[in-house]
Amino acid sequence: RLPTIDSAHAKTCYLEMDGTIKRYVGAAEITEDILPILENATITIYEGSKIYLQLKTNKSGKCAFKLPLERYFKVQVSKEGYVTKFFEVKTEVPQHNLDAYI
């Protein structure tokens, strides 16, 4: 059996994620650094089928959140009039680093 993190005795550790949500425009002359930002987009984080956290991007299209370790999440980025995007996050700690979190 592999060792696991005992949440009752674990240090307060988490995965912190932040980023900027931008709108892809598809034009060849537009580079990533000048893509239009997407303010007030909804970020919904699911753990299984339940909503774990929901937040909105700010005026600069930025968002930040923290996720507990040793879990699996699905992140949804949406805004009315745009295609909804999903990505998955697994906050598992590699076995060779486990001692740092116990």
Image (cartoon, rainbow, N blue to C red):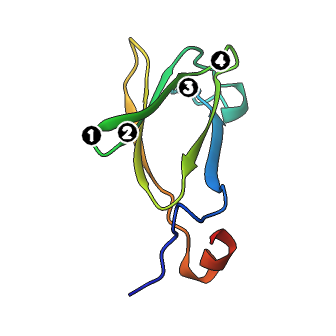
Judging depth in this view, the residue of 96 and 102 nearest the camera is: 102
The earlier-in-sequence mark between 3 and 1 is 3
Numbered label attached to residue 49: 1
| Label 4 environment density (alpha carbons within 10 Å; few <14, some 14–19, many ≥20) | some
Of the pair 80 and 46, the residue shown nearer to us: 46
Q: Amino acid at mark 2?
A: Tyr
Mark 3 secondary-structure assignment: loop
Left or right, residue 100 beside residue 78: right
Q: Which residue is denoted by mark 2 in the rendering?
A: 46
Q: How far apart are the two marked residues, 3 and 1, measured between alpha carbons? A: 36 Å
The image's mark for residue 27 is 3
* Crowd band around label 1 with a 10 angstrom C-alpha radius: few (<14), some (14–19), many (20+): few
Q: Mark 4 or mark 1: which is in front?
A: 1
Q: Residue at x 54, y 61 (%)?
A: 8
Please state the horizontal and vertical placement of residue 40, each as a whole percent of the image: 55, 14
Q: Residue at x 39, y 12 (%)?
A: 80
Q: Can residue 56 be seen in the rendering of this structure?
A: yes
Does residue 25 appear anywhere in the picture? no
Amino acid under label 4? Asn
- Three-letter residue code for mark 3: Ala
Q: Is residue 1 above or below residue 35?
A: below
Q: CA distance from mark 4 to mark 1?
A: 26 Å
- Residue 70 point in image, percent of width and height: 48, 62
